[in-house]
Image: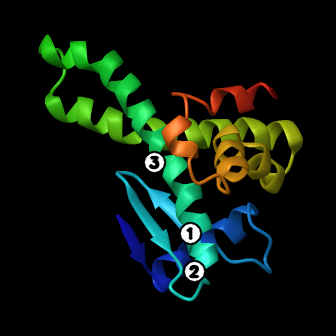
Amino acid sequence: MVIRSRRALALITWVAHTLGTVPRWRRVVGFAFPPPLILVDPDASTAAVQDTIAHEQVHVEQWAECALVSLALVGPVVVLGAAPLWVGALAAYVAWPALYVALWAVWALRYRSARAAYLLHPCEAEARLTAGDPGYLTRRKPFAWVRFAFGS
């Protein structure tokens, strides 16, 4: 689902500027917030919106993959009654954001730069490098972002 929201993106831009992941002169024109909700800038050009949606759709796929792995790991615990159902649902929901933040933190510490951590982040690398390919999602292999983590 694509939502055009100037206010939400203004807040996200402020956070990105504060963290240093986006230069102060740029603004965020899109953001994926799972489940598959994609925010785009209503003032952006049609081409920019299409590129942004393609970029964010890759993140939605990454989130879905991590949710499935999380459910595979936590599901048996829930089925056996050792944890309530909401624990499984929460684990699936936060798996990708938690992985994203953890990888970002590792890169930020390694390169001592929030911006470099964002640019080198394997999830961002996959989304950025494939956004111009309209058929990428149909050909994409599961966990394709992992190859970007190891520089191949």
Q: Quadrant of residue 90?
A: top left
Packing grade of label 2 (10 A; few <14, some 14-19, many >=20) is few
Q: CA distance from mark 2 to mark 3?
A: 21 Å
Q: Quadrant of residue 101?
A: top right
* Residue 141 located left or right of residue 132: left
Q: Identify residue for label 3.
A: 60
Amino acid type assigned to the residue bearing label 1 in the image: Gln
Packing grade of label 1 (10 A; few <14, some 14-19, many >=20) is some
Q: CA distance from mark 1 to mark 3?
A: 15 Å
Q: Identify residue for label 2.
A: 46
> Which is more toward the observer, 42 or 132?
132
Packing grade of label 3 (10 A; few <14, some 14-19, many >=20) is many
Residue pushed farthest front?
Answer: 135
Q: Quadrant of residue 108?
A: top right
Asked if the residue at tag 1 contacts the one at tag 2, i.e. Cβ–Cβ closer than 8 Å, the answer is yes
Q: Identify residue for label 1.
A: 50
Residue 81 is situated, as x and y percent measured from the top left of the image, at 12, 15
Residue occupying image coordinates x 52% and y 43%: 137
Residue 136 is situated, as x and y percent measured from the top left of the image, at 58, 44
Q: Check the picture and name the quadrant holding the C terminus.
A: top right
Residue pushed farthest bottom?
Answer: 43
Amino acid type assigned to the residue bearing label 3 in the image: Val
